[in-house]
Image (cartoon, rainbow, N blue to C red):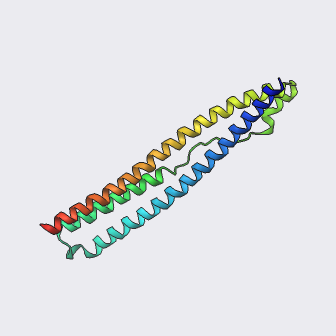
Amino acid sequence: MANTDDLIREATRNGEERLRVQMQIALAADQRAVSLGGILAAAASVVLGFLLTDANRLDGATSYICLFLSVGLCSASVLAFYSVRPVSMRFAGNKPSNWRDDIESDKPIVDALLEQMSHIDNAIDLNEAVINSNAKAFGWAMATAAGTVALSAIAGAVSAVS
């Protein structure tokens, strides 16, 4: 039974460590998304500012390309910021008062840790779903930005040749 007790304690410790790592991953992803969103919003503003100040000197194709580029970069920025929206993440540890019933009923620590393992498993699964959802939104932001820039470059090249 001592080996089982040690395994349960180790599994619980590893689960709590995974929750901590998930939180670090989520925070790093948020920082990356905020940075990208800010850069994209700034780029969209510069292109739109250029369009608005020089609109009467630009030909029609260039104006439309600038407008498309600005709207596309702004859309990518919105997607990046969407991936940073407030979400419900589960983290390691719990309130000491959550153990009160176990203490009062003199529940064996191994049984209490087995319940804690179940809680940790559920928390890890919920965090994974949130992380994956935010990663998908960030991926769409990257794809939108890249696609917008590529299409604008192609349109500019075609416009220059014609």
Q: Nearer the viewer, residue 26 or 2?
A: 2
Compare residues 120 and 95 and report the one nearer the observer: 120
For this view, does 36 lie left or right of residue 152?
right
Q: How many marks?
A: 0
Outermost residue toward the front in this view: 3
Q: Quadrant of the C terminus?
A: bottom left
Give whichever of 10, 107 is nearer the camera.
Answer: 10
Q: Residue at x 58, y 36 (%)?
A: 126
Q: Nearer the viewer, residue 38 or 5?
A: 5
Horizontally, residue 107 falls left or right of residue 133, namely: right
Locate residue 39: give its quadrant.
bottom left
Query: Left or right of 44: which side holds 122?
Result: right
- Residue 90, image x and y in percent? 64, 41
Say which residue appears at 58% left-offset and 49% top-offset.
25
Residue 61 % position (x, y): 18, 65
- Measured from the top left, where is residue 135 in percent x and y? 48, 46
Farthest residue, direction left? 162
Q: Is residue 95 left or right of residue 69?
A: right
Instruction: Report whether residue 140 is seen.
Output: yes
In the rendered image, which quarter is residue 1 located in? top right
Look at 68% across and 29% down and name the residue there.
118
Query: How far across and down, in percent of the image, does residue 64 sit?
Result: 22, 63
In this view of the protein, can residue 91 be seen by the observer? no
